[in-house]
Amino acid sequence: MSDGHQHNGHEKVPSRQRRRFPGISSRAYEHPADRSALVALRKLTGFDTVFKALSGLLPERSLRLLFLSDSVRVSERQFAHLNVMLRDACYILDLDKVPQMYVKQDPTPNAMCIGLDEPIIVVTTGLVELLDEEEMRAVVGHEVGHALSGHSVYRTILLFLTSLAVRVAWIPLGSVAIMAIVTALREWFRKSELSADRAGLLVGQDLQASMRGLMKIAGGNHLHEMNVDAFLEQAEEYDAGGDLRDSVLKILNVLPRSHPFTTVRAAELKKWAETREYQRIVDGHYPRRDEDKDASVRDSWRDSASSYAGDVKNSKDPLMKLVNDIAGGAGDLGDRVRRGFGGFTSSGPRPAQGPDGPQEPGTPSDPDTGGGRPPRDGT
């Protein structure tokens, strides 16, 4: 339990007892798609060293100096409650070196873990003011999970390439190759966010607090006006609603984002918290860091493929149902293709049409698919 132990010379005084996970590997909580990519990279001897060397032109020192000069560094004398949360999170996940943490003046709720040589965590004042203690603890655990997984290196590369793509946009085809890399990195990072959400739950060990935090990020500090169950129902409606056109719009909406949509994150986290996998970790049965070198790339890829297959099979999204139908050889697939986009609504085949209109009331709905300007990269 996290109950007042010493860590790096600082006494741990958490607000309540929580289980600790000595030697835990990030493989324990990583989303299968995230894990398979990272395990493959880790198996390449010297990959991180070469990667960092090739990334020597990145303005990491400039970033560190910027935060040091224009933000508030969390310590025992500044934002002491965040300092306790940070050290407690590192103690629970057994991260030896506590990352530096900064609070940046910005009304937009946001947090990130960046850095090549050493990760640093940055949270905005908007986030600090929005969340209560347990909600904030989950966010700090989320960012410490990024640090433990080694995500900060690739996150920094992603931020740099996103900025670079804008700068070279005027060069013919100059930004095409860069944006292809950025798109791939964003797809990976969206999966890594699901991993970090799991780390946040392992640190906070309060599912309702994690749910509330995500809900506040989506709807602001109006908790009395919101309901977790209704929020999760939005995720189910988003997954199931509309027709094939809406599925395409969902893809287009998410492509510019580095993070999954908040309702999706909440649903994914709740689903994981109800699994036997999560319970085994809580019971002390989890992969250890000293076993990482023996991790099987093949097993990780198999887990990833199995996860994607399960997502396709269980999804109510029309496009995913189409993929599943093609794989399963659905008998009415040809008829549905002939009917076009409308043949792939979440409610199944449309009712027969009579001369005076539908013979029975139709049920398809047309939920809002979102859109608008993507929010900034954040928690």
Image: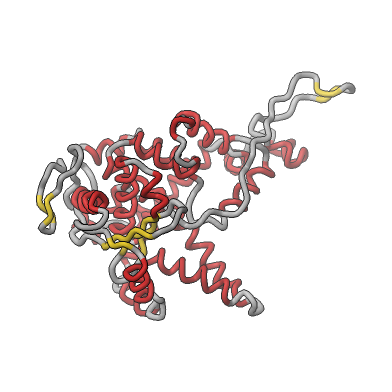
Quarter of image, res 255: bottom right
Q: Nearer the viewer, residue 320 or 170?
A: 170
Residue 33 shows in the view: no
User: Relative to 90, is 65 on the left or the right?
Assistant: right
Q: Nearer the viewer, residue 313 or 1?
A: 1
User: Relative to 34, is 359 on the left or the right?
Assistant: right
Q: How is the image coloured?
A: secondary structure
Question: Where in the figure is residue 199, as x and y percent of width and height?
Answer: 31, 47
Please give the name of the residue rendered at 34% of the width and 36% of the height, measured from the top-left corner: 207
Question: Where in the figure is residue 175, as x and y percent of width and height?
Answer: 59, 73
Please give the name of the residue rendered at 11% of the width and 51% of the height, measured from the top-left corner: 11
Please give the name of the residue rendered at 25% of the width and 57% of the height, measured from the top-left corner: 78
Please give the name of the residue rendered at 28% of the width and 62% of the height, measured from the top-left corner: 73
Position of the N terminus, as image quadrant, is: top left
User: Relative to 12, is 368 on the left or the right?
Assistant: right
Quarter of image, res 154: bottom left
Question: Where in the figure is residue 56, as x and y percent of width and height?
Answer: 37, 80
Counting the numbered discs, the total is 0
